[in-house]
Image: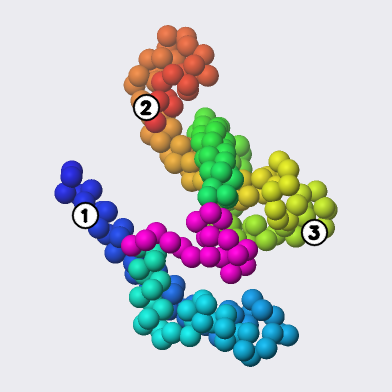
Amino acid sequence: MARYIIKRILMVIVIMIAAAFVIFTILYFTPGDPARNQLGPTATAADVENLRAVLGLDKSYLAQLASFMSDTFLHLDLGTSWTYNVPVMQELLNHLPYTVFIGLTAMILNVAVGLSLGIFAATHEGRWQDSVSMVIAMVFISIPDFWLALMMIVLFAQRLGWLPAYGVDSWKSFIMPIIVMSLPGIAVNARQTRSSMLEVFRADYITTARAKGQAEGVVVRRHMLPNA
């Protein structure tokens, strides 16, 4: 077990280094000058060159790559945000509570709604309720989340004006991100729950529980769902 964990940790480290290398290389060769973008079109050439020197953009590709890798992985220094002019780590920590809240809420919805939808479909196997539930799950799992996010912004923020398109001004700001994050998980949980429920639906202990006169809801909650 320890050998497996060490192997996985080493694999994660290699993947992180490779991803950092690829991302840095792509951004390095992307057209555009960050110094010029920061200072604006009215800045003089001397001001741009001075800022390039401050940011280290006047160095060669290998020198910049070595500095980036050293700061990131050896000193855990992600640098200063060119947009907000504050340390990147500080900006990440400022937004971490929102990310955790959105992720946990989406996870709770995944489990609660996904399980309910899967149970509903399994207990109505072969009927229209089952078909409708699985069609809903298929739609949820097929829609790309980035496209759904854009369409929700267009509809609810731009057209209807019900929800904010960006920012964290109130509780309304969390509605669209949570919905977009939870829908694919709801679909997966619903399909898996339905499949697992149907495997135990006609098991002997389920038939025995029904023969003892237990209500169908009790059979589903106490016998079918835990085993499924």
Name the residue nearer the viewer: 86 or 220.
86
Tell me the element at label 1: helix
Q: Find out whether the residues at labels 3 and 2 contact each other: C-beta distance under 8 Å.
A: no
Q: Residue at x 82, y 52 (%)?
A: 161
Q: Classify mark 2: residues with Cα within 10 Å, few (<14), some (14-19) or many (20+).
A: few
| Marking on residue 7 | 1
Q: Looking at the image, is mark 1 or mark 3 nearer the viewer? A: 1
Q: Classify mark 1: residues with Cα within 10 Å, few (<14), some (14-19) or many (20+).
A: few
Between the C-alphas of marks 1 and 3, the distance is 49 Å
Dot 1 or dot 3: first in sequence order is 1
| Marking on residue 227 | 2
- Residue 47 at what x, y percent from top left? 63, 84
Magenta-drawn stretch, dominant element (helix, strand or loop): loop
Q: Residue at x 48, y 41 (%)?
A: 189
| Marking on residue 216 | none
Q: Looking at the image, is mark 3 or mark 2 nearer the viewer? A: 3
Q: Residue at x 56, y 55 (%)?
A: 91
Tell me the element at label 2: helix
Q: Classify mark 3: residues with Cα within 10 Å, few (<14), some (14-19) or many (20+).
A: some
- The amino acid marked with disc number 3 is Gln
- In the picture of the structure, the residue carrying the numbered disc 3 is 158
Name the residue nearer the viewer: 40 or 116.
40
- The amino acid marked with disc number 1 is Lys
Name the outermost residue toward the bottom. 45
Position of the N terminus by quadrant: top left
- The amino acid marked with disc number 2 is Asn
Instruction: Specify the segment rendered in magenta.
Output: 74-92
**In the rendered view, does 218 fall on the left or right side of 183?**
left
